Image (cartoon, helix red, strand yellow):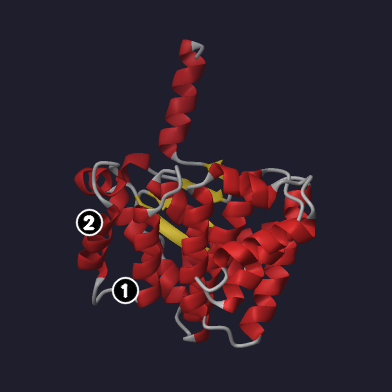
């Protein structure tokens, strides 16, 4: 986000944190906010009206309260009304913030139950399973497959193997990707989980599994580099041949042999 949207999102985050402290039903709030996001996404005129930076804040708040009052819980109404009062640089940032808050509410429930680490790991493993199975990825990403069918398939894959929050988030990702690739949606959810735990997540790709000592050494190096706690999510990919590739957010450090070969090939061919 840029400009005024960052401040607007921060204001919503503060109100969300206060709602959590006040004992709001976290699962209920998440479902309400997911529903509101879908309504806003599906009506461009409404989205513009609620996120219009030139609009009168009180009028936008009243519009949100009138539209959603009696249809969702008070916690969700309060947050969407507050969001409508803010100044957004881009109307998409408005709905993105509502979605992120919904995801964070489910993650906060997992955190309260002491299982947020598991949920993050399960989401990551689900993403890797989908990435490694072309037929499954195509089915879950296809616009020709109805949302209920996708959600049912996710339930079949994860029931008994993952926590309720993991299953619900995976179902949301496949049912309502909001114009994004599935892997991008899941990556966004994983980023929110890491932020919830006040950690950075490093995606580590290697040809063979790291030993405990190697993982600990890498984690220490990254924590020194970024000045923050870092969790490692490791992908074993024999195609990298050797070396290591580390991605933290948008920053990539590629020291794999395959990357070096590609670099040498480009140098030789001039491409």
Q: Quadrant of residue 150?
A: bottom left
> Could you say which is closer to the camera, residue 91 or residue 101?
91
What residue is rendered at 31% in x and 48% in y?
131
- Per the image, label 1 sits on a secondary structure element best described as loop
How packed is label 2: few (under 14 Cα within 10 Å), some, or many (20 or more)?
Answer: some
**Can residue 241 be seen by looking at this rendering?**
no
How far from the left and from the top, in percent, is residue 149?
22, 56
How far from the left and from the top, in percent, is residue 204?
46, 53
Label annotation for residue 117: none
Q: Please give the residue where the numbered disc 2 appears in the rendered image.
A: 149
How far from the left and from the top, in percent, is residue 151?
28, 61
Q: How many marks?
A: 2
What residue is rendered at 48% in x and 19% in y?
266
- Per the image, label 2 sits on a secondary structure element best described as helix
How packed is label 1: few (under 14 Cα within 10 Å), some, or many (20 or more)?
Answer: some
Q: Please give the residue where the numbered disc 1 appears in the rendered image.
A: 162
Relative to 53, residue 153 above or below: below
Relative to 228, residue 47 above or below: above
Give the mark toward the camera: 1 or 2: 2
View extreme (top): residue: 270
What residue is rendered at 39% in x and 56% in y?
173
**Can residue 8 be seen by looking at this rendering?**
yes
> Could you say which is closer to the camera, residue 13 or residue 159?
13
Report the side of 85 relative to 172 (left or right).
Answer: right
Report the side of 241 relative to 190 (left or right).
Answer: left
Q: Which numbered disc, 1 or 2, marks the residue that appears first in the sequence? A: 2
How far from the left and from the top, in percent, is residue 224?
68, 62
> Could you say which is closer to the camera, residue 188 or residue 251?
188
- State if disc 2 and disc 1 touch (CB < 8 Å): no
Relative to 65, residue 57 above or below: above
């Amino acid at each position: 986000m840029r400009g005024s949207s960052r401040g607007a999102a921060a204001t919503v985050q503060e109100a969300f944190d206060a709602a959590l402290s006040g004992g709001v039903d976290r699962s209920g709030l998440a479902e309400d906010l997911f529903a509101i996001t879908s309504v806003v996404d599906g009506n461009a005129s409404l989205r513009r009206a609620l996120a219009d930076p030139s609009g009168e804040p009180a009028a936008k708040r009243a519009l949100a309260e009138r539209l959603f009052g009696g249809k969702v819980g008070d916690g969700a109404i309060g947050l969407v009304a507050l969001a409508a009062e803010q100044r957004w640089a881009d109307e998409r940032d408005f709905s993105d913030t509502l979605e992120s808050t919904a995801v964070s509410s489910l993650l906060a429930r997992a955190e309260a139950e002491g299982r947020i680490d598991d949920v993050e790991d399960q989401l990551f493993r689900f993403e890797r399973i989908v990435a490694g199975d072309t037929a499954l990825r195509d089915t879950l990403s296809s616009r020709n497959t109805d949302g209920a069918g996708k959600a049912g398939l996710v339930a079949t894959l994860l029931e008994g193997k993952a926590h309720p929050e993991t299953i619900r988030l995976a179902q949301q990702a496949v049912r309502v990707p909001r114009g994004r690739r599935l892997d991008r949606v899941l990556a966004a959810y994983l980023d929110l989980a890491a932020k919830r735990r006040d950690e950075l997540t490093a995606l580590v790709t290697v040809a063979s599994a790291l030993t405990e000592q190697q993982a600990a050494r890498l984690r220490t190096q990254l924590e020194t580099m970024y000045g923050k706690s870092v969790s490692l999510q490791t992908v074993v990919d024999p195609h990298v041949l050797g070396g290591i590739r580390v991605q933290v957010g948008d920053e990539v450090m590629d020291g794999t042999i395959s990357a070096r070969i590609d670099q040498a090939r480009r140098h030789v061919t001039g491409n």
